[in-house]
Image: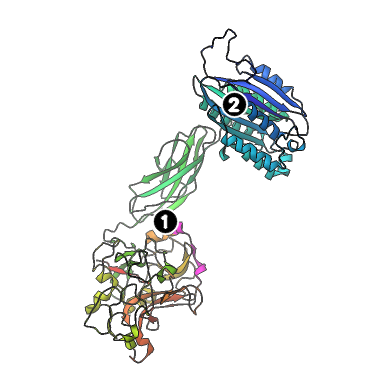
Amino acid sequence: MLTVAVIFATGCKKEQPEPNNNGNGEEPELTSSVYLGIVGYNGTLAVKEFALLDESSVDDFEAFIDNLMTSDGSALYYSEYKAIEMLQSSIEPQQLSNVSLVTITAGLDNVSIASEETNPENYETNEAYRSALHEAIVTNTIHGKNINAYTLGLLTEEAQSDYDEFRANLQMLASKEENAYEVADMTVSYNSLSVIATDIISKIGDQKSGLIMLVLDNRVESKTMAGWFIGKIVNPQNPGPGPNPDPIEQPVVITSNVTDITSNSAVCGGEVISDGGASVTERGICWSTTSNPTISNHHANNGTGTGSYSVTITDLSPNTRYYVRAFATNSEGTAYGEDVSFITLPDDNDVPEGAIPGKFTIEIGGKEVYFSQGNLQYQASTNTWRFAENQYDILGELNANISSTYSGWIDLFGWGTSGYHNESDIYNVYYQPYSSFFGVAFSQEPGYTINRSGYGPSYGESLDGSNANYDWGINNAISNGGGEPNQWRTLTQVEWNYIIHGRSTSSGIRYAKAQVNGVAGMIMLPDDWSVSVYDLNNTNTSNASYEDNDISEVEWKSVLEPKGAVFFPAAGVRMETSVIMGTSYSGPTGFYWSVDPYTGSSDDRRATCALGFGFASSAVQADDDSDSFRASGCSVRLVRNVQ
């Protein structure tokens, strides 16, 4: 296969006269100029010297290309080698602004390493040869200018049979990945050549000169395209005949995830990844309460061209499902991205900071609460409390960091370890949120036997009423939950049980096991939940599998959470400094404290326990049989009363 290098240059080889010299030693005033020279290989090297490329010389260069012989042998690497060598030996032209190398090829080389003539550096493999060429392309400068190298590979049957080699050659002979064009037919080839030629012309600019190399193999199609490319450089508006050289298609655009959802606004976005061969004159977001909206519905613009963008859409209705699509318009028409839906938040001014908008009835008679946006977390070094940013966030093994100076966060706590001290209570011996059962010589402390080292108030007393300061939310301000103490509290055991097993809901669904963003846990649904929001499997079933409902982060944030769904991740428990993510139930396990202690016999080992809400792969419990040692580190999820 013959390989030809066509060189457009404003300089020439050192032993030749400068092409811009008019013969009397005077330099004419330059306009935008390119010069052309040809290097081809068909058994021997064929060269056409550098000369000015204009309308008067086009026929001469095209005739040279047409007369090039064809063969089955390709010396692609050797042609590139000689082309770079000629660039390096050229005289610096006046007002040089661009140096480019363009390769049109079938993409393979089966001759270059075969002889000393075509392999002067004695490379042992094709890989070594093209790697050296790539290094020369990306590191060498020609008269202080970097080489902009483009490759266009026609995917012939031969190239398909050795596709890896074909792709490697295209990538390595380009100066950057996006400059490598793989094309399957002539129509796409002409379009890609037009993009390359336009880019080169724009880089040269007005009143400047360009040094451009075109490396061409011997195929008839490639020679035809090379002639058209030369015409495109000389006359960008009318390069000559070609099979639909500049086909225009609609843009390609994708829709991004919806974020920052409120009761009346949301941030939507998109990305135009292809302009279709014509300038994108308009892009943006369209939306509606029905699927697949178009620009005939509500829409908002954001700029022109390719790339990413975002739009804040406003004046939305609360608690409503919307559909959005990104769009982009060029001369061929308007294209749309994927249809993405989300639900605006309820218009409820009573929803407090740090709360999920869903309301949950906690007792007969209708008293309601909001759940916090995530599990409680604590930073010992700053004595700061916060709610997890996402409902599925768990800290796992990080809870083993038990220290008053630890600057990270923990989310598993011994029962009632809010940091409150009651020195008159012999059963409470200064336990901190980071306390561990063996943190000090607890066996010597008062109350050790009965109260398992004094976690929380005295035996039989809960964390409410006169002991409310032991509760995490009563005693401490939550930094992202209003920032004031006495706003949040822990549920009682009766309240937990009523939410899970006793309350009535619009849908009849109270809970479901699930995986949210890959985290196992349990979803609880608000009283007004509608089955049309999301189709959950095996609801109200204690022995269901977490895998029954596999919910992505996008689905959770855009569909379920805005409608008030609450997720309790299976965060495990901490025993001393060991974090156990599963138990004898097998699989992920979650346990959440209530305010209530176990009130059986003080001689019973369970006297050292407190009650809560627990679940595993085979059970969901929130009764007097659901308990854990007070010294265990368990999860805390706080609530606020609906006013």
Of 418 and 285, nearer the camera is 418
Image quarter of residue 296: top left
Dot in front, 1 or 2: 2
Q: Kindly identify the amino acid type of the residue bearing the numbered disc 2.
A: Ile
Residue 34 image offset from top left, x and y in percent: 57, 21
Considering the image in quadrants, where does the N terminus appear?
top right
Seen in the picture, residue 307 relative to 453 is either above or below; the reply is above
Seen in the picture, residue 107 relative to 258 is either above or below; the reply is above
Seen in the picture, residue 402 relative to 437 is either above or below; the reply is above
Of 253 and 325, nearer the camera is 253
From the image, tell me which residue sits under label 2.
212
Q: Residues within 10 Å of mark 1 (few under 14, many from 20)?
A: many
Image quarter of residue 557: bottom left
Residue 131 image offset from top left, x and y in percent: 64, 41
Q: Kindly identify the amino acid type of the residue bearing the numbered disc 1.
A: Ser
Image quarter of residue 449: bottom left
From the image, tell me which residue sits under label 1.
558
Of 148 and 492, nearer the camera is 148
Q: Residue furthest top?
A: 24
Marks counted in the figure total 2
Residue 594 image offset from top left, x and y in percent: 33, 77
Q: Secondary structure at mark 1?
A: helix
Mark-to-mark CA distance, 1 and 2 = 51 Å
Considering the image in quadrants, where does the C terminus appear?
bottom left
Residue range highlighted in magenta? 545-555
Q: Are marks 1 and 2 in contact (CB under 8 Å)?
A: no
Q: Is residue 330 visible?
A: yes
Q: Earlier in the sequence, mark 1 or mark 2?
A: 2
Q: Secondary structure at mark 2?
A: strand
- Magenta residue check for 219: no
